[in-house]
Amino acid sequence: MRCLLLHCNKFSYKFHHATPVAEPSDEQESTFQDAMVVFVAAEKSDVDETVEKAATEILNIAQKVEAKQIVINPFAHLTKSLASASKALELTKALVSNLKEKSKLDIVYTSFGWYKSFTLDVYGHNGSQEFREFS
């Protein structure tokens, strides 16, 4: 699992079109303030322990930067070793569940399988821009 973590002053997204594996979603766009935005790519080798490691590290970083919420955004473009769509969806949802169990922060999930446009206003402090690989 690969994660790009960005502590954003402001983050917004808007759905443009669905891929063949897209989840249905009522929310087509949203904006967040002071959020740890996590772009997540699930890989072929990922297992439950991978999700556990990723959740722990994401929470550690979010707490360190004092983010008010965590936004999980599936983002296949971080790896060339993608898990199948069904496995990636399962692992990403497991990550969200794990984060919700461990944290009192608001955990938001943007939906799987959509092409989205983004607006990012990323802080420039230490820890505001991190990349992690979990195996």
Image: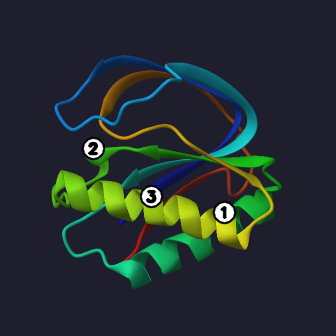
Residue at 50% across, 79% down: 53
State the CA–CA distance, disc 3 to disc 2: 18 Å
According to the picture, the residue beneath numbered tag 2 turns out to be 77
Residue at 50% across, 37% down: 110
| Image quarter of the C terminus | bottom left
Amino acid type assigned to the residue bearing label 2 in the image: His
First in sequence: mark 1 or mark 2? 2
Please tell me how crowded label 3 is: few (under 14), some (14-19), or many (20+) other residues with Cα within 10 Å.
Answer: some
- Label of residue 100 in the image: 1
9 with respect to 50 (left or right): right
State the CA–CA distance, disc 1 to disc 2: 25 Å
How many callouts does the rendering have? Answer: 3
Element carrying mark 1: helix
Amino acid type assigned to the residue bearing label 1 in the image: Lys
In the image shown, does 110 or 7 lie closer to the viewer?
Answer: 110
Q: Quadrant of residue 32?
A: top right
Amino acid type assigned to the residue bearing label 3 in the image: Lys
Please tell me how crowded label 2 is: few (under 14), some (14-19), or many (20+) other residues with Cα within 10 Å.
Answer: few
114 with respect to 34 (left or right): left
Element carrying mark 3: helix
First in sequence: mark 1 or mark 3? 3
In the image shown, does 123 or 111 lie closer to the viewer?
Answer: 111
According to the picture, the residue beneath numbered tag 3 turns out to be 93
Please tell me how crowded label 1 is: few (under 14), some (14-19), or many (20+) other residues with Cα within 10 Å.
Answer: some
Q: Is residue 42 above or below residue 110?
A: below
Q: Nearer the viewer, mark 1 or mark 2?
A: 1
13 with respect to 113 (left or right): right
Q: Position of residue 63 (x, y in %)?
A: 78, 64
State the CA–CA distance, disc 1 to disc 3: 11 Å
First in sequence: mark 3 or mark 2? 2
